[in-house]
Image (spheres, rainbow, N blue to C red):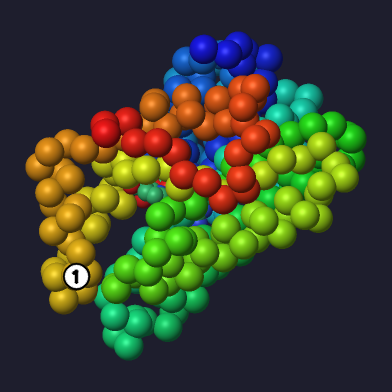
Amino acid sequence: MIDVTHQVAVITGASRGLGAGIAARCLERGLRIAACARTQPALNGAAEQLLTVAADVTDHAAMTQFCEATVERFGRIDLWINNAGLLAPIGPLRDNDPAAFARHIEVNVVGVFNASQAFIRHLRARDGEGVLLNISSGAARSAYAGWSAYCAGKAAVDRMSESIALEEADSGLRVHAVAPGIIDTDMQAMIRDCTPEQFPRVQKFLDLKAKDGFSSPAFVADRLLELAFGPEGAKQPVAMSLPLEKG
Ligand SMILES: NC(=O)c1ccc[n+]([C@@H]2O[C@H](COP(=O)([O-])OP(=O)(O)OC[C@H]3O[C@@H](n4cnc5c(N)ncnc54)[C@H](OP(=O)(O)O)[C@@H]3O)[C@@H](O)[C@H]2O)c1
């Protein structure tokens, strides 16, 4: 495994689920990390290695402050992982609550904009190299009935990432929109709770639970660190998918 002990990473949406698992694995691998969510992440680490902040990705000023606080604590940021995200509203678009749809786009798209802008400005100011990983989904690339907000939001993240890659080609930034596989989190529990009327493909996710076909957060974290800092990472396309842990 590559040595990442000198790297500094930021993870959004790190209070539970995939983000908390990525943060925990990064700490185990010796990175210094800053982690945020609306609920302050409860992670184990000394102040020299860990900064946790309660911040909402939809708050532009809060993302700027989170970025500044991280640089103040650790000196710089090498890797920024935009992981915070929502699935709701689920169900046919004709039934979606307009406020829930707007909130979805605010978190899953505007939140990625807010955090990406803070990181890009940091990199440009310090004239250094960095990697931006936006957590996407297979739903960015295939349509699912019942997930119109999620599919639209993640497709927007893919295109936003590709646009950033073009805009920052002359800087030291590399960006990927990464479909991480399927990980058993609160979001997956929400999917399994759907009726077939809300989400016609629910059985696929019930079957996956029955055979425990999930990738673990530690497996995803190791692949993300390899993508960011390993020798092959730069050869990957902007929009890409991680392999599954269990065939
Ligand atoms: N699980 C999967 O199989 C899977 C598959 C493909 C892609 N993904 C993507 O992976 C990411 C993580 O998903 P997950 O399954 O871990 O979801 P999750 O269990 O629902 O966790 C979501 C995380 O995002 C945080 N969050 C939500 N809204 C936020 C906001 N406005 N500001 C800051 N943080 C916020 C939550 O913390 P607070 O509630 O405390 O804010 C929580 O820490 C998402 O982008 C998701 O779309 C997941």
The location of residue 138, given as percent across then percent down, is 40, 55
Residue, far front: 235
Quadrant in the rendering for residue 158: bottom right
Q: Residue furthest left?
A: 210
The answer to which of 220 and 138 lies nearer the viewer is 138
Q: Residue at x 78, y 25 (%)?
A: 75
Q: Is residue 68 above or below residue 142?
A: above
Where residue 217 sits in the image (x, y, percent)?
A: 37, 32
Q: Residue at x 62, y 48 (%)?
A: 238
Look at mark 1 in the image and give the residue it sits on: 200
Q: Disc 1 residue type?
A: Pro
Q: Residue at x 32, y 88 (%)?
A: 94
The image quadrant where one finds the C terminus is top left
Viewer-side residue, 211 vs 112: 211
Q: Position of residue 77 (x, y in %)?
A: 72, 31
Q: Can the viewer see residue 139?
A: yes
113 sits left or right of 83 in the view: right
The percent coordinates of residue 206 (x first, y second) are 13, 52
Query: For mark 1, does the 10 Å Cα neighbourhood hold few (<14), some (14 to 19), or many (20 or more) residues?
Result: some
For label 1, the SS is loop
Seen from the viewer's position, the closer of residues 111 and 53 is 111
Lateral position of residue 159 relative to residue 70, left or right: left
- Does the image show residue 33? no
Question: Does the Cβ of the disc 1 residue fall within 8 Å of ligand 1?
Answer: no
**Residue in view at x 61 percent, y 45 percent:** 237
The answer to which image quadrant residue 70 occupies is top right
Q: Quadrant of residue 228?
A: top right
Left of 26 or right of it: where is 17?
left
Tell me if residue 169 comes above or below residue 89 in the rendering: above
Relative to 163, residue 135 above or below: above
- Drawn side of residue 129 relative to residue 97, left or right: right
